[in-house]
Amino acid sequence: MKALVMALLRVYRYAVSPMLGRNCRFVPSCSEYALEAVERHGAFKGSWLAARRVCRCHPFSGGGYDPVP
């Protein structure tokens, strides 16, 4: 399951993300964060952490450095 989620994230990162531009307010970017979270914590918890991060990435967010716990 972990390999499938990471493969989907890589496809997004290299196929879809370049068309959307650099809009992430955080460092590392949301896709990098998601890959690292899934790699460290597994498919389910990593996906949950990534989803929480994407919800925080909006125009009214301060952004900044936000590492994977």
Image (cartoon, grey):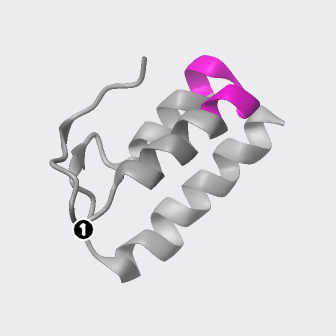
Considering only vertical position in the picture, is 17 above or below 68?
Answer: below
Q: Residue at x 43, y 17 (%)?
A: 69
Q: Give the percent coordinates (x, y) of residue 57.
A: 34, 55
Considering only vertical position in the picture, is 37 above or below 17?
Answer: above
SS class, disc 1 = loop
Considering only vertical position in the picture, is 47 above or below 24?
Answer: above
Considering only vertical position in the picture, is 8 above or below 51?
Answer: below
Q: How many marks?
A: 1
Q: Circle 1 is placed at which residue position?
A: 22
Q: Give the percent coordinates (x, y) of residue 3.
A: 75, 37
Q: Give the percent coordinates (x, y) of residue 23.
A: 25, 67
Residue 10 colored in magenta in the image: no
Q: Residue at x 57, y 19 (%)?
A: 40
Instruction: State the extent of the magenta-drawn residues as a range.
Output: 39-46
Is residue 31 visible in this depiction of the protein?
no
Q: Give the percent coordinates (x, y) of residue 32.
A: 41, 43
Name the foreground residue: 64 vs 60. Answer: 60
